[in-house]
Image (cartoon, rainbow, N blue to C red):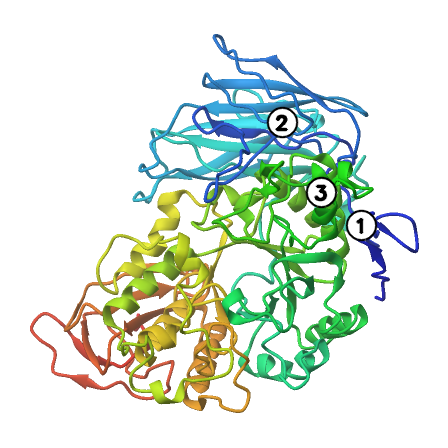
Amino acid sequence: MNRSNEFDPTSGRTATDGGTPEADRGFESGDGSHHPGPPRFVTVDDGIVNPNGREMETRDDLAPRNPEAGAAYDWRILESPAGSTAEPTDDPVAEFEPDVPGVYTLALEAPDGIHQLTVRAFPAEDESDPRPRVSLDAAIGDDRIELSVTATVAGSDRADDDLEIEYYVDDRDDAEIGPDGTIPIENVTDRVRVYAVAVGDRHSVPDAIELVPASGAEGVDDTDTGTTEPVRIERPFEPPDWVTDAPVYEIFTRRFPDQDEPTFESIADRLDHLETLGIDVLWLTPFLEAESGFGTPMDHGGPHGYNTRDYFAVDPDLGTMADFEALVDACHDRDIRVVFDLVINHTADTHPFYEAAVDESHPDHERYRDWYRWEEFEARDPDTYFGWDGIPNLDHGNPAVRAYLLSVVDFWAETVDGIRADVAWGVPLSFWTEIHDRVTSADSEFFLLDETLPSDVEMGGGRFHMHHDDVLRDTLESIGASVGTTDETGRDSANADDRESEGSDDSEADAVADEFTDSGVDADGATAILEAIAERDRRGAHPDSEWLLYVENHDTDRYLTQYGRDAQRAAGAATFTLPGSPMLYYGQETGATGRREPMNWDAFDDDLLAFYRRLIDLRRSHPALASDARLERLEFEADTDAAVAFARADPASGRQVVVLLHFGEGTATVEIDDPIETTDLCSGDPVSEGDSTEGWNHAIAVDSVVVLESVA
């Protein structure tokens, strides 16, 4: 697909067609109306708010969908619980803080009519309590659809009898749920969206199903679906099939290709490396025209591209749009999907919109002044995160901003397979809900990955399919810090002399992620990784949420450099043997030492590369290491708290494996009872067994990782 990127960033219009670049697929949110979307579920203490200064807190608002710049939108209360005086703010994109628990009905008056929205406000909650999880399903009977749920609270293997289940039908749909939790089939003449929330001491993230008639207004007949049921059930929050278990590879786009000619073309020339590794997904850090392009010094973060100057133009130093599309095609030829790093919380302060906003003499000053959030406009002091100069935050409370950013999403969703959302917590939840609906309605295989630090389970269930697992990553860092072997410079002392390289940033202050988050669990030793996985359930993550498991990324220092080779191998093995989708940051597998240094194409650590190839091969081939295989704790004894043992079990095949990890130097001895085969599935070699002590059947020597088949 060849598309013009001749976009006038000052006017927001293309030179060729007089308007915002149009995607070929015809993206549309919902039914194309301004209806604000699904019911909202909040607490009275949090509400639906989006103020300045919430650097690490998720934002939210009430907003019309498919917004039109300059159109009139008005919010008001239709019904509220007794005693409430809460009102939405007087803005097209409004805030609303319920003051009494209960159900509110809001009205949005828009150019296409009046739309109603249900807001369920729960009492204030103690966030230290575990949060329920709910999974909604339905059975199709002769004349009725019977809803059913599975609801659990962390630490319980059964549905909690104290949980209440609340059902809601989308305000856009014409159907009602009876007191017995059923819907007459004859009432499902069009698509019906149903939501369930489990309520105990806290309320769950909602789950949803869609009831689609087999014929009628949807135009779906029995021959198309292959079903004899009058209604089929769809699960809109499920991730695409290709996402589950897909090994992900992140590249720092301007540092990965050949450094004598760093272009999209030379990235494509290096794809054989990813194919040989067994990579399924390529995540490209920003490659658009940005302030931080080639030549940006490392004390300014290197050529990172996260301060965009033009959302519709690739960096010309990397090539043309056609060159980028050829790269995507080359990935697809190798069955590698491509994920675009979307940066819509902020722009560069050299973006033409911002330059117009701060310049009163600019002809578009009045238009763009309201496109940004301000601490104090007269001082030209924009709202930013963490005091980071040069990246002013956009104002998503402006319908024109939302309309523009939707056109950005539409444009790139035509070419790539998914989006990774940078600083996702800085963009309102309502906007991500609209984006999810917009792109997945057009392409059910489209993928959405969020960055929230700390990870926010509200991003699941109809916003994102996958989340950065910052809890596991920070836990791995804590373990590395406790056992790693580094010299006073922070380098692995065994290899320090070989670690100097162009672009190395070891002398920098702490990496970005280390400046503002520490999400590791409060547990000692290597067993903390098991607590990190359990934390997903305690937080109440949506059952369909997938997790990106990583040791390092572009915002962290290199694990190898910080904590040494032994710890890095064990941490890497953890990401490939725990539930989730493992990710490699370019050079992790080849011994790169600088956070954003050029890829070490001519200096691979071949032993380390072979180690990661074996991990990927094992992960892809063994069903007991798949994301949906159970994680089971084992009784074990070790001569160091830097070691841990656990099991994974595939419920479909019945196969099980035992995983032994050791993060420290040298060899640990781990004793277990479980009956096992004695060949290490990772290395292919027989394990080294010593004399076990009383009460244990096996005493196994573990360097970094041993994976053993269980004997039934």
Of tags 2 and 1, which is closer to the observer? 1
Name which residue type carries label 3: Ala
Q: In the structure shown, which secondary structural element does the residue marked by tag 2 occupy?
A: loop
Q: Which residue is mark 2?
A: 94
10 Å crowding of disc 2: few (<14), some (14-19), many (20+): many
Which quadrant does the C terminus fall into? bottom left
Dividing the picture into quadrants, the one containing residue 279 is bottom right
Q: Kindly report the distance in space between the C-alpha atoms of the residues bearing marks 2 and 1.
A: 27 Å
Judge left or right: residue 710 versus residue 580.
Answer: left
Across and down, in percent, residue 506 comes to: 41, 74
Q: Amino acid at mark 2?
A: Ala
Residue 156, can we see it?
Answer: yes
Q: Quadrant of residue 71?
A: top right
Which residue lies under the disc numbered 3? 357
Q: CA distance from mark 1 to mark 3?
A: 11 Å
Given the image, on which type of amino acid does mark 1 rest?
A: Thr
Query: Measured along the vertical axis of the image, is residue 149 above or below residue 331?
Result: above
Q: Is residue 706 left or right of residue 195?
A: left
Is 338 rendered above or below residue 462?
A: below
Q: Looking at the rendering, which quadrant does residue 329 occupy? A: bottom right
x and y percentages locating residue 190 in the rendered image: 74, 32
Pair 1/3: label in front: 3
Q: How far apart are the two marked residues, 2 and 3, measured between alpha carbons?
A: 22 Å
At horizontal 27% and vertical 85% (from top left) the residue drawn is: 687
Q: Position of residue 211 (x, y in %)?
A: 66, 36
- Residue 481 x, y percent position in the rendering: 28, 67
Q: Which residue is mark 1?
A: 10
